[in-house]
Image (cartoon, rainbow, N blue to C red):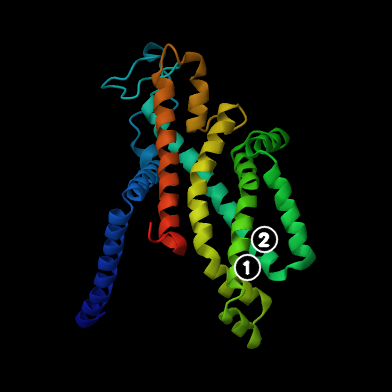
């Protein structure tokens, strides 16, 4: 590439970077709580990605001489009943909890988008059948349904993701169907039909694309709920099995030792609470910005 071409490329990239930073700065000014949530979420994701490589100790290394040590310079979060470093286990547990939450929400969002858009587009008996099925799912308590699925499928990482996906899909179907019904009345959808566009093209390129904002908002808020659901299943003994470590599993394992060693409960519980809080306030901020009815708030 010539020198003039490189300069032109830099000139194009520079305004984009400035626009991105300006948009982020505007988000921080308008929604400070949302910015805090974004920081917490970014930190949790960073820990999940690089944490296992920078953990101070191997998470499963046991030492009988160092069991149940209180937080110190050597072990910032203390040690558990087997002498394992709690800070390393909390860091490694972030990967499992974040992975389960993101995967379950991604799967439920994809399924919810496909079923919701097709339900709104085709209508009739298909729409009636889908909505009655959604009514059944929403009538069942989410945790009870997840427990029943785990009892039927067995304990494994993938089964936890399946259980959380099933329990969180119904709400997304309703949200995307409602948004799709509003988009279907737009003139560009009628124009696409008039020029002979196929059903798949209309649903994906015209209806789904213009219905994504509410789905993104709901999915962002649902990430915290998915992580909390995984922790609840692990706390009840039907979640992620060993040797995988998750925050819920760490909290569950600390029940017998909570009075003698409260740090076993405090640190994984604090990581879980802050991450769920970050996702919730970030989802609320995105809703306030992208929902036309709330832009003035």
Up the image or down, 9 lies above or below 276; here it is below
Q: Nearer the viewer, mark 1 or mark 2?
A: 1
Screen quadrant of the C terminus: bottom left
| Residue 241 appears in view | no
Q: CA distance from mark 1 to mark 2?
A: 13 Å
| Residue 69 appears in view | yes
**Tag 2 secondary structure:** helix
- 108 vs 125, nearest the viewer: 125
Residue at (61%, 51%) from the top-left corner? 171
**Is 213 displayed left or right of 135 in the figure?**
left
Screen quadrant of the N terminus: bottom left
Query: In terms of sequence position, does the residue under pointer 1 or pointer 2 come before the other?
Result: 2
Give the class, few, some or many, for how many residues have Cα within 10 Å of label 1's Cα (few <14, many ≥20).
some
Residue 296 position, x and y percent, is 38, 60
**Tag 1 secondary structure:** helix
Residue 4 position, x and y percent, is 20, 82
Q: Which residue is mark 1?
A: 181
Q: Which mark is residue 115?
A: 2
Up the image or down, 262 lies above or below 91; here it is above
Asked whether the beta carbons under mark 1 and mark 2 sit within 8 Å of each other, the answer is no
Residue 283 position, x and y percent, is 45, 51
Residue at (27%, 58%) from the top-left corner? 25
- 216 vs 165, nearest the viewer: 216
- Displayed quadrant of residue 67: top left
Most extreme residue toward the bottom, as rendered? 195
Residue at (29%, 70%) from the top-left corner? 16
Residue at (79%, 64%) from the top-left corner? 125
Give the class, few, some or many, for how many residues have Cα within 10 Å of label 2's Cα (few <14, many ≥20).
many
Up the image or down, 162 lies above or below 8; here it is above
């Amino acid at each position: 590439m010539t020198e003039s071409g490189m300069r032109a490329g830099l000139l194009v990239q520079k305004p984009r970077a400035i626009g991105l930073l300006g948009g982020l700065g505007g988000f921080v000014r308008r929604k400070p709580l949302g910015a805090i949530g974004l920081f917490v979420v970014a930190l949790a994701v960073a820990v999940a990605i690089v944490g296992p490589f920078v953990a101070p100790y191997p998470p499963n290394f046991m030492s009988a001489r160092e069991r149940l040590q209180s937080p110190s310079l050597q072990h910032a979060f203390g040690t558990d009943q087997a002498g394992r470093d709690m800070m390393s286990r909390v860091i490694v547990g972030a990967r499992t909890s974040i992975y389960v939450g993101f995967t379950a929400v991604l799967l439920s969002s994809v399924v919810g988008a496909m079923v919701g858009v097709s339900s709104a587009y085709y209508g009739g008996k298909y729409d009636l059948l889908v909505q009655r099925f959604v009514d059944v799912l929403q009538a069942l308590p989410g945790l009870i349904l997840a427990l029943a699925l785990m009892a039927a499928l067995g304990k494994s990482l993938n089964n936890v993701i399946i259980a959380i996906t099933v329990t969180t899909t119904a709400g997304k179907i309703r949200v995307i169907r409602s948004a799709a019904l509003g988009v279907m009345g737009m003139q560009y959808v009628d124009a696409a039909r008039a020029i002979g566009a196929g059903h798949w093209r209309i649903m994906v390129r015209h209806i789904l694309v213009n219905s994504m904002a509410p789905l993104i908002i709901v999915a962002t808020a649902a990430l915290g709920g998915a992580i909390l659901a995984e922790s609840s299943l692990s706390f009840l003994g039907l979640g992620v099995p060993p040797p995988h470590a998750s925050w819920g599993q760490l909290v569950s394992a600390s029940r017998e030792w909570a009075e003698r060693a409260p740090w076993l409960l405090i640190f994984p519980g604090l990581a879980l609470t802050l991450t769920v809080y970050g996702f919730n306030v970030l989802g609320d901020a995105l809703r306030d910005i992208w929902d036309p009815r709330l832009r003035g708030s």
